[in-house]
Amino acid sequence: MTAQANKETIRRIYAALETGDRAPFGAAVHPDYVWRLTGHASWSRRFEGQEAVRRNLFAPLFGLFATTYTARAINLIAEGDTVVAEVRGDVMTKRGERYNNEYCFLFRFSGGKIVEIVEYGDTALEERVLGNYDAVLAAHRGADD
């Protein structure tokens, strides 16, 4: 795939995410992709594989939300197998707080699929609005029982 084709994939993902549609993202990732949240906060960690990302990142995270998470790409830059996306997310939590993080994502492609995502965001906002990752994960797992 070309850098332009990869950029178009990310553009389509964020066009859908503007309305909360996550299906194009799911279709674009490799089953073994890695999602890495940078920084030194409790949410800063590495998730490996589509199932681990769903179970250990998305499920507890989206369980905190009262409204549909939306995101829009502000700027996209592509070179080689990497697309960089400046993104604004927005959602209301069940505690009545806005989680409107501003991100820079690096998407690395191989064979037309996303194989790695590196997320840079406001980790202070993550901790303040979302809470401690381990506590969120434990609460989510307790709710499944």
Image (tube, grey):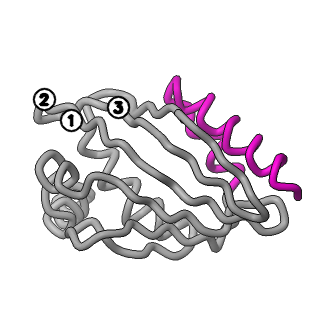
| Disc number for residue 6 | none
- What is the x, y in percent for residue 136? 19, 59
Residue 129 lies, in percent from the top left, at: 15, 45
Q: Residue furthest right?
A: 1
For residue 90, the mark is 3
- CA gap between label 1 and label 2 equals 5 Å
Q: Earlier in the sequence, mark 3 or mark 2?
A: 3
At a point 30% along the width and 70% down the height, the residue shown is: 39
Q: Quadrant of residue 64?
A: top left
Q: Decide: few, some or many residues near mark 3? Use Cα within 10 Å; few <14, some 14-19, many ≥20.
A: some
Q: Nearer the viewer, residue 137 or 143?
A: 137
Q: Badge 1: how crowded within 10 Å, few (<14), some, or many (20+)?
A: many
Q: Which residues are magenta?
A: 1-28
Q: Are marks 1 and 2 in contact (CB under 8 Å)?
A: yes
Identify the residue at image location x=52%, y=26%: 18
Q: Which mark is in front, 1 or 3?
A: 3
- Secondary structure at numbered mark 1: loop
Residue under label 1: 93
